[in-house]
Amino acid sequence: MFYFDPLYMLVMAVSLVLSLWATAKVKMAFARYRNVPASKGLTGAEVAEQLLTQAGVNARVGAVAHRSLLGGDGGDLMDHYDPRTREVNLSPSVHKGTSVAAYGIAAHEVGHAIQHAQGYAPLAIRNAIAPAAAFGSNLSYFLIFIGFMMSAFSLVKIGILFFIVVVAFQLITVPVELDASRRAKVLLRETGFIVGDEGKGVAAVLDAAALTYLAAAATALLNLAYLLLRARDR
C-alpha cells in the first residue's frame, strides 16, 4: 500500500500538480498587482482599519513577521484573521503596501472579521472543527498505515474517520474563503478605496487565491476516495 501502490502514486501526482498550479497562479497574480499602486495611496493596514471601523467591527490590525510557505520574504501571503484574538494579521507587503494587491488581501481578511462578528455559520463550523482537523491530519495516516500493516482494521476505520474530519474542514473552507473575497470586492467598491480598473486587479488576486482552497479540497477528496477504495479492497 501507499508508496508501492501505482494508484496511490497517481493520486499523489495529481494532488501535487493541483497544488503547484494553484500556488503558481496566486503567486503570479500577487507579483503582478503588488506593483500596481492604488489611486488612494493608503496602506493596506489603513484600508483594513477604516473598513473595520465603517463595518462597526471590533478587531485589531497587526503584522505578520514569518516567512511564507508559498515563497517570498517577510511573511508574504501569510495574511490571516485570528478569531481567537480578533486580529487581522497582514504580511509586510500588505500591511505597508499601497498596491491594488495589498488592498484586495487586506479587505479579504476584513471580510473574515465581519463574518465572525455577524456569526456567519460556515465560519463558525470551520472554527469549531479546526482543532479536530489539525489533530486528525497528524494522526489519520499513521493509524491507517499501522492498521494495514497489522491487519488491525479497527485502526484503519478510526484513521479514516479522522481523515473525514480533515476533508470536512477543507470543504467548509471553500465557501468561507469565497464569501470573504466577495465581501472584500463589495467593500472596496462601496467605500471608494478602489476605482476604475483597480477592481480587476483585486478580483485577479482574490480569484487566484481561491484556487488554492479549491485545490486543497480536491486533493483531500482524492485522498479520501483512495483510502475508502483500499479499505474496501482489504
Image (tube, rainbow, N blue to C red):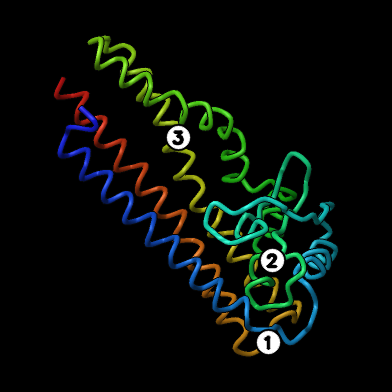
| Sequence order check, earlier mark of 2 and 3 | 2
Task: Using the image, determine if residue 189 lies above or below residue 12.
Answer: below
- Amino acid type, label 1: Val
| Left or right of residue 151, residue 36 in this image | right
Q: Are marks 1 and 3 in contact (CB under 8 Å)?
A: no
Secondary structure beneath label 3: helix
Secondary structure beneath label 2: helix
Q: In this rendered view, identify the residue nearer to me: 221 or 187.
A: 221
Q: x, y percentage for residue 169?
A: 49, 39
Rendered residue at 20%/45% (across/down): 10
Q: Quadrant of the N terminus?
A: top left
Residue denoted by label 3: 166
| Left or right of residue 222, residue 140 in this image | right
Rendered residue at 25%/44% (across/down): 11
| Sequence order check, earlier mark of 1 and 3 | 3
Task: Using the image, determine if residue 216 lies above or below residue 185.
Answer: above
Alpha-carbon span between mark 1 and mark 2: 15 Å
Residue denoted by label 1: 195
| Sequence order check, earlier mark of 1 and 2 | 2
Q: Quadrant of the C terminus?
A: top left
Residue denoted by label 2: 107
Rendered residue at 22%/23% (across/down): 231
